[in-house]
C-alpha cells in the first residue's frame, strides 16, 4: 500500500488567497483525520470523518476553514481566505474501525505570506 | 476529558546513553496509550501502544514503555540511544478504538555524537 497520500507537499501563497489541501487515505480505512502542527500550538486535531461523514469539527479554527470528504478515497481541507497565521504543517491521517493505529501522511507545509 | 502532559520539551542525550521521556495522562476511564515518533520532515508513525494485558510494551527498535495506572504514567525508555533516534516523540491517549486520539505537546530528543 502507498500509505496516506497528501498533496501538495509544499504550498506558498499570499494572504487572502484560497488554499486547498488534498488527502487520499489508505484504501479501506474508514476514519480520516486532519491535523495542524505548529511550534506554538503543537499538534491540533482539526476535524475527523467516519465513513465520509464529519464526526467532530470542534477543532476547526474558524469559518475560513472547511473540510469535505466526497468519497472514501479523497478529502480536502480548504482555507479561504488564507492568513499568515495559518502557516503550519497540515497532516492527514487514516485509521480502520477497530484498529487503534493512525497512519499519517507526510504532511503539507503551508506558508502564507 | 482526557489530557496528556509531556514534561520535557527537549531532551539532549549522548549516543549510547540511556534515555527516559516522560508522559502523564489524565482520564476518568480506562484508556489506550500510544507513543508516536516523528522523524524530521516526516509524518508521525506509531512506535508502540498499550491496550491491555502486560503493562510493559516494546517496540522493534529497542524502546519500551510501562503503563503505571496508579501514577497515570506511560514513560518511554531506551537503554542505549543511537543517532538515528533523533526525532520528536508524542505521547497520546484515547478512550476506545472509536474515539479520537489526544496527543501531548511532544518531546524533542536530540542524540549527540
Image (spheres, rainbow, N blue to C red):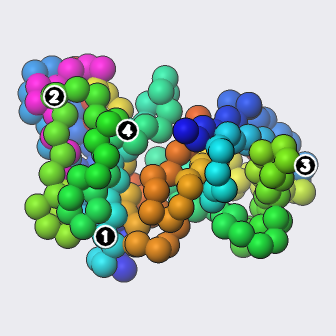
Q: Earlier in the sequence, mark 4 or mark 1?
A: 1
Q: Is residue A28 above or below residue A63?
A: below
Instruction: Name the residue that disc number 2 marks.
Output: A64
CA gap, disc 4 and disc 2: 15 Å
Q: From which residue to which does the magenta span run?
A: A76-85
Residue A60 locus on image (x, y percent): 28, 34
Disc 2, SS:
loop
CA gap, disc 4 and disc 3: 33 Å
- Residue A36, numbered circle: 4
Residue A92 at least partly seen? no
Residue occupying image coordinates x 77% and y 67%: B57
Which residue, as the protein is rendered here, is positioned at the far front? B28
Q: Nearer the viewer, mark 3 or mark 2?
A: 2
Q: Nearer the viewer, mark 1 or mark 2?
A: 1
Residue occupying image coordinates x 71% and y 69%: B52
Q: Earlier in the sequence, mark 1 or mark 2?
A: 1
**Circle 2 marks a residue in which chain?**
A
Q: Nearer the viewer, mark 1 or mark 3?
A: 1
CA gap, disc 3 and disc 2: 47 Å
Instruction: Name the residue that disc number 3 marks.
Output: B17
Cβ atoms at labels 4 and 1 below 8 Å apart: no
Looking at the rendered structure, whether the residues under marks 4 and 2 are on a common chain is answered as yes
Q: Is residue B28 above or below residue A31?
A: above
Instruction: Name the residue that disc number 1 marks.
Output: A30
Q: Earlier in the sequence, mark 4 or mark 2?
A: 4
Left or right: residue A32 compared with residue A15? right
Mark 4: give few (<14), some (14-19) or many (20+) Cα within 10 Å: many
Residue A10 at least partly seen? yes
Looking at the rendered structure, whether the residues under marks 1 and 2 are on a common chain is answered as yes
CA gap, disc 1 and disc 3: 41 Å
Amino acid at each position: 500500500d502507498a500509505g496516506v497520500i497528501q498533496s501538495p507537499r509544499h504550498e506558498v501563497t499570499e494572504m487572502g488567497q484560497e488554499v486547498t489541501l488534498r488527502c487520499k487515505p489508505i484504501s479501506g480505512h474508514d476514519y480520516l483525520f486532519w491535523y495542524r502542527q505548529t511550534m506554538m500550538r503543537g499538534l491540533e486535531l482539526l476535524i475527523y470523518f467516519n465513513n465520509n461523514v464529519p464526526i467532530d469539527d470542534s477543532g476547526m479554527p474558524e469559518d475560513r476553514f472547511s473540510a469535505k470528504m466526497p468519497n472514501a478515497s479523497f478529502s480536502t481541507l480548504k482555507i479561504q481566505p488564507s492568513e499568515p497565521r495559518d502557516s503550519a504543517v497540515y497532516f492527514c491521517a487514516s485509521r480502520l474501525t477497530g484498529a487503534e493505529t493512525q497512519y499519517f501522511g507526510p504532511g503539507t507545509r503551508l506558508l502564507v505570506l | 476529558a482526557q489530557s496528556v502532559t509531556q514534561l520535557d520539551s527537549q531532551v539532549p542525550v549522548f549516543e549510547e546513553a540511556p534515555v527516559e521521556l516522560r508522559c502523564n495522562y489524565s482520564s476518568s476511564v480506562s484508556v489506550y496509550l500510544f507513543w508516536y515518533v516523528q522523524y524530521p520532515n516526516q509524518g508521525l508513525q506509531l512506535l508502540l501502544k498499550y491496550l491491555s494485558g502486560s503493562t510493559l510494551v516494546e517496540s522493534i527498535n529497542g524502546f519500551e514503555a510501562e503503563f503505571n495506572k496508579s501514577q497515570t504514567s506511560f514513560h518511554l525508555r531506551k537503554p542505549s540511544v543511537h543517532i538515528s533516534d533523533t526525532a520528536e516523540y508524542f505521547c497520546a491517549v484515547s478512550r476506545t478504538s472509536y474515539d479520537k486520539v489526544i496527543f501531548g505537546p511532544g518531546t524533542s530528543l536530540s542524540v549527540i555524537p
